[in-house]
Image (tube, helix red, strand yellow):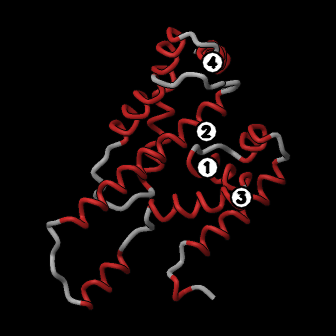
Amino acid sequence: MTNGTITKLLQTWSEGDQEAAERVLPLVYDELRHIASRQLRQEREGHTLQATAVVHEAYLRLQGQGGFEWPSRAHFFAFAAHLIRRILVDHARHRNRAKRGGGLERVTLAEAADLALERCPDLVALDEALTCLESLDPRKAAVVELRFFAGLTLDETAQHLGVSPETVGREWRRARAWLYDQLQPVEGRA
């Protein structure tokens, strides 16, 4: 099926046609799985979620969505990427709450330092930093979400935001630098 057909189904779904939603979601499943896989690759090793499970959760949440406008595939995939990010952040927060409650293992201070060095960037910390960036500069946050989470190109992101690719490139570089600074350990900041 062509991209134009998918866009038309998304627009029909926006108008309230649930049958269009049922027809389009299987057509975009592979792209949703690709987005989920890309985001899971950014996670720590041994993550308990699989891309398929994340997509199925996103699929269920998308089916229940109403009142959204999907004027293009880019809008839809941007929203889907945001939704997948929310699922992963919710999972990470749930996992962290469970860790605080029990099953704790005693380790020496040296072992704790070694574990901290091995740790991957925390998705919850990234989400909090991105939320902060959104309050300071919504367009930069949108660029990060579209480029990093949705995997859109500079041109696709520019089209989605209604700005030039050069502007997106500038915003992307500045947002990455800002996020990098925010995600550094406190003692590593100037």
Give the foreground label among 3 and 1. 1
Closest to the observer: 47 or 128? Answer: 128
Q: Which mark is residue 14?
A: 4
Q: CA distance from mark 4 to mark 1?
A: 22 Å
Q: Which residue is mark 2?
A: 78
- Whichever of labels 4 and 1 marks the residue nearer the N terminus, that label is 4
Q: CA distance from mark 4 to mark 3?
A: 29 Å
Instruction: Tell me where residue 50 appears, x and y as whole percent.
Output: 32, 44
- Whichever of labels 3 and 1 marks the residue nearer the N terminus, that label is 1
Q: Secondary structure at mark 1?
A: helix
- Whichever of labels 4 and 3 marks the residue nearer the N terminus, that label is 4
Q: CA distance from mark 2 to mark 1?
A: 7 Å
Disc 2 marks a residue whose amino acid type is Ala
* Circles 3 and 2: CB atoms closer than 8 Å: no
* Circles 4 and 2: CB atoms closer than 8 Å: no
- Whichever of labels 4 and 2 marks the residue nearer the N terminus, that label is 4
Instruction: Estimate how packed mark 2 is, as few (under 14), some (14 to 19) or many (20 or more) residues with alpha carbons within 10 Å.
Output: many
Q: Is residue 59 left or right of residue 178?
A: left
Disc 4 marks a residue whose amino acid type is Ser
Q: Decide: is 174 above or below 139.
A: below
- Quarter location, residue 94: bottom left
* Circles 2 and 1: CB atoms closer than 8 Å: yes
Q: Is residue 178 left or right of residue 33?
A: right
Disc 3 marks a residue whose amino acid type is Trp
| Quadrant placement of the N terminus | top right
Q: Which residue is mark 1?
A: 145
- Whichever of labels 2 and 1 marks the residue nearer the N terminus, that label is 2
